[in-house]
Amino acid sequence: MTDSSRSLFEKARRLIPGGVNSPVRAFRAVGGDPVFLARGKGSRVWDVDEKEYLDYLGSWGPLILGHAPDEVLAALAATMRLGTSFGAPTALEVELADRVVEAVPSIEKVRMVNSGTEATLSAVRLARAVTGRDLIVKADGCYHGHVDALLVSAGSGLATFGIPGTPGVPQEVAAQTLVVPYNDEAALERIYRQHGPGIAAFIVEPVAGNMGVVPPGPGYLEAARRITREHGSLLIFDEVITGFRVAYGGAQSRYRVLPDLTTLGKIIGGGLPVGAYGGRADLMDRVAPAGDVYQAGTLSGNPLAMAAGLATLEALHRLDPYPRLEALGHKLESGIIAAAQKEGVPVRVQRVGSMLTVFFREGEVTDFASAGRSDTRAYGRFFHGMLSRTV
């Protein structure tokens, strides 16, 4: 940690809870204190003392084109001169919606919001409204934003009613969420046999990211589609991370499984705050003002976020960087494995496209329980070893 970062963090802790505006920035999981960054360009960032780093974080995903790409900056500059917010419709909202509908196979209509949390909250509310049911099923270890009903964990690792994952979430709210292990088709079957008539939707990351990268097992997404359909329930893919990341049309395009509703974020804002949810037209037409399910946002469809997102998606469509991302991801994966083998360190590297996690353990990671058996202290040492080498 540089001197300026240390001074800023001391001041931040006097003014901001924990010194950060999102808990993952505080380094609690790996130890130490955070580095304060000042600028970025391409694959590089510089801290407040002008120390240069190679950046694999990419602001947690939205910077698929790198830091400060010229086309996104140009779009932002042109839009900013016209105004930053109107509280009224703009053409940019329509253009970005058109691009999303064209790209994502299951989306016929889409509503822009301001974050992934807003997107999942709204999708769950819509699912409950259209089915007339209250229960939601989620997979243990999958993160869907800080929505009260989705901040739950399984505890035993078996199919169970949710328990609050944080103080402030009423037990009555958490009890409306059922939790099953990720990649466990049998557990999903059981929970639907037991509670099917009351389940509004199964919400899942098609490629898990919050527990580290855990790909769906063969047939898992197909099973989720079949089971939800058989029970008159909806399937919601949380593609806030995977949307436009693992393929231009998201994980649903890569794995050829179509959900009823999809949540998006990260990349469709090009580095600015954004979220979206969309799906079949008959479902989305229940959203106000077309229908009776209320959801609103003063800054939803903000012109700056729309301009940055549109410029990003247009560049992705034009450049088709996914084969290159696949090749670079494979090169990084192979290099890490070779280095670990050389030093006799047991690791499991899991990757989907440019999403990658190094688990310090042997054997495949298929769910939250197996991810939890990794050597997290070794990961912390690895993290700080890389950081000290400006990665």
Image (cartoon, grey):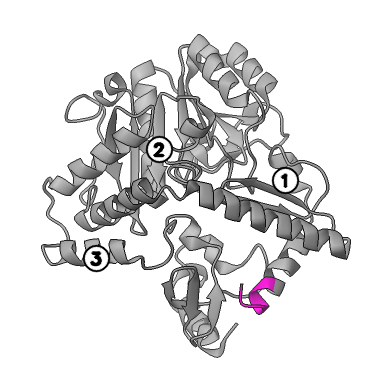
**Residue 320 lies in the magenta stretch:** no
Question: Considering the image in quadrants, where does the C terminus appear?
Answer: bottom right
Chain part drawn in magenta:
386-391
Crowdedness near tag 3: few (<14), some (14–19) or many (≥20) residues, C-alpha within 10 Å: some
Q: Is residue 391 left or right of residue 87?
A: right
Residue type beneath disc 3: Ala
Q: Is residue 135 left or right of residue 338?
A: left
Mark found first going from the N terminus, 1 or 2? 2
Q: Which residue position holds label 3? A: 74
Q: Classify 346 as above or below 161.
A: below
Q: Classify 232 as above or below 254.
A: above
Crowdedness near tag 1: few (<14), some (14–19) or many (≥20) residues, C-alpha within 10 Å: many
Mark found first going from the N terminus, 2 or 3? 3
Compute the Cα span from label 1 to label 2: 25 Å
Q: Which residue position holds label 2? A: 263
Q: Which residue position holds label 1? A: 371
Residue type beneath disc 1: Ala
Residue 280 screen position, x and y as percent: 32, 23
